[in-house]
């Protein structure tokens, strides 16, 4: 099966940079997704990495190391609206990789 | 707005009852996924339909069932409800029915409260 680990909570200051880590164990890697979820709302897609390296998308970047089973999401120039949970997910092997297995999420609180 | 719609937004019911949650995927998407999110379990996959056919099952209880109709909307039926079924239920859609290399887009969810 899959196992995904993320820190439960993080706190950062408005305007700063924060890195949210995710480690995973899965047989047959097929990419890793990051989603943002504000409390009580739907998860929204942030990024998808399938190759090693850093992918930048505006203030958000995502990094993947397949050999280490490791990814991180980097958020720059933090804004108050970035306070949310960040979910790391990988395709679920038992479902032919059709569904996603999500980590428990990292709740980020941005302070003034 | 992801383009995925779900109704109702909130549902309050009693133990032992049966409810139906409805989801309409984004235009052009043939796949519908159902997920359950409770405080202690995180986001858990329940079931996947592609173009009317069941394609994958996750941790879905026997009391729960789903279907996808010819117009591609999907319904999740929850019966003999228990207190522990209280959760947010999300549906997500994507274009293909194969491995998840393309993005799943989530609807706004239905918050189910069982009293």
Image (cartoon, coloured by chain):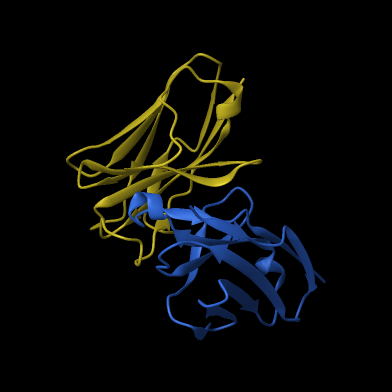
Chain colours: A blue, B yellow
Residue A101 percent location from the top left of the image: 49, 54
Name which residue lies at 72% across and 81% down. Answer: A17
Name which residue lies at 64% across and 51% down. Answer: A39
Q: How many marks?
A: 0
Q: Quadrant of the C terminus of chain B?
A: top right
Name which residue lies at 75% across and 81% down. Answer: A15
Name which residue lies at 31% across and 55% down. Answer: B26
Viewer-proximal residue among B33 and B9: B33
Viewer-proximal residue among B34 and B72: B34
Q: Quadrant of the N terminus of chain B?
A: bottom left
Looking at the picture, does residue B96 appear above or below residue B54? below
Position of residue B58 in the picture relative to residue A79 (left or right): left
Residue A63 percent location from the top left of the image: 56, 80
Looking at the picture, does residue B78 appear above or below residue A88? above
Residue A7 percent location from the top left of the image: 71, 62
Residue A82 percent location from the top left of the image: 66, 68
Position of residue A57 in the picture relative to residue B30 (left or right): right
Quadrant of the rendered image containing residue A73: bottom right
Quadrant of the rendered image containing residue B102: bottom left
Residue that protrudes farthest toward the left in the picture: B70
């Amino acid at each position: 099966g899959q196992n995904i680990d993320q820190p439960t909570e993080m706190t950062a200051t408005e305007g700063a940079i924060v890195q949210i880590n995710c480690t995973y164990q899965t047989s047959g890697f097929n990419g890793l997704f990051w989603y943002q979820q504000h409390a009580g709302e739907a998860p929204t897609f942030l990024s998808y990495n399938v190759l090693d390296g850093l992918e930048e998308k505006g203030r958000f970047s995502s990094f993947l190391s397949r050999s280490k089973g490791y990814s991180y999401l980097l958020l720059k120039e933090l804004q108050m609206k970035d306070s949310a949970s960040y979910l790391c997910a990988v395709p679920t092997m038992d479902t032919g990789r059709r569904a996603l297995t999500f980590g428990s999420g990292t709740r980020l609180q941005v302070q003034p | 707005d992801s383009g995925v719609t779900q109704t109702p937004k909130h549902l309050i019911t009693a133990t032992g009852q049966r409810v139906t949650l409805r989801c309409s995927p984004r235009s052009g998407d043939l796949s519908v996924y159902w997920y359950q999110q409770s405080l202690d379990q995180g986001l858990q996959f329940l079931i996947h339909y592609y173009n009317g056919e069941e394609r994958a099952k996750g941790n879905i209880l026997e009391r729960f069932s789903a279907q996808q109709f010819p117009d591609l909307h999907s319904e999740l039926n929850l019966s003999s409800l228990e207190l522990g079924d209280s959760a947010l239920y999300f549906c997500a859609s994507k274009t293909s029915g194969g491995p998840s290399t393309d993005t799943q887009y989530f609807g706004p969810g239905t918050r189910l409260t069982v009293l």
